[in-house]
Amino acid sequence: MNFKDKVVIITGAGRGIGRSIALKYALASAKVVIAEKEQESGEETLHHIHTSGGDAFFHPTDVSNPSDVDSLVKKTEEKYGTIHILINNAGISAFKSPYELLIEEWDNIINTNLRSAFICSREAAKVMKKYKRGSIVNIASTRAFMSEPGSEAYAASKGGIIALTHALAVSLAADGIQVNAISPGWIETENYSQLRKIDHTQHLSGRVGKPEDIARACLYLTSDDNDFITGANLVIDGGMTKKMIYES
């Protein structure tokens, strides 16, 4: 897929899944906007793209801060003239007992993961609607459907993202904007070589996921060839959530 001259904003693009998405779009000839809170990691992603000959710029962005989002969108339009694609990837987690989770921690997770997806989408859509074409992908999680203890805030934020996705898909359809979600399962972003055999065999695919698996799906959903899929949530988990696992 070729994304030549397409302008793509990726939030949380400094590491992990976000960085992989940014690099994949850059390799497909897109103009990439790296929206990242951490200066060092954002600059590292920018360096990777520039080293490979890609077109990108880094805009320090705390997506939980609406003024940062406003600045991100305005700067992108000033530099590239428009916005074609937005990937709402930025997210944080804090796994704590619901008895111990502070309201401030709850608010921080909801604001960073969920509220930001709405604000970023709204502001980017204001630009996209001028051209009657745009694509938004929200990165949710299989934790919207299944949980471990102490994951209330994270699960709520990701479940909210899926609901937000179909609501925005309906609201923005008249402006030619598609909105979809991707729910990754286990995506190992650091020590893939240290995973155990049992980690891989929990998946129908026979392996734990990699960031590139999510990046490829983003390109698929935002390609010009996709003029039909919208309001969908694509679960990418190697079949893990479909496999019944019994303890022996």
Image (cartoon, rainbow, N blue to C red):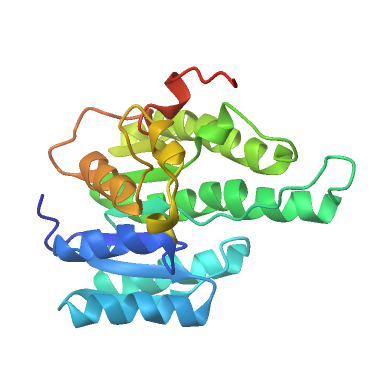
**Would residue 154 appear left or right of 201 to someone viewing this image?**
right
Q: Is residue 185 visible?
A: no
The residue furthest right is: 99
Provide residue 98's location: percent of width, then percent of height. Answer: 83, 40
Q: Residue at 70% across / 52% down in the picture?
A: 94
Q: Is residue 166 visible?
A: yes
Q: How many numbered badges does the structure rendering display?
A: 0
Q: Residue at 86% across / 52% down in the picture?
A: 102
Q: Looking at the image, is 242 positioned above or below residue 2?
A: above
Q: Looking at the image, is 176 positioned above or below residue 27?
A: above
| 117, 113: nearer the viewer | 113
| 97, 166: nearer the viewer | 97
Q: Residue at 41% across / 37% down in the picture?
A: 181
- Quarter of image, res 153: top right
**Would residue 188 appear left or right of 33 to someone viewing this image?**
right
- Quarter of image, res 169: top left
Quadrant of the image containing the C terminus: top right
| 134, 214: nearer the viewer | 214
- Quarter of image, res 176: top left
Q: Residue at 52% across / 21% down in the picture?
A: 245
Provide residue 174's location: percent of width, then percent of height. Answer: 33, 32
Provide residue 18's location: percent of width, then percent of height. Answer: 40, 59
Provide residue 106's location: percent of width, then percent of height. Answer: 76, 49
| 44, 77: nearer the viewer | 44
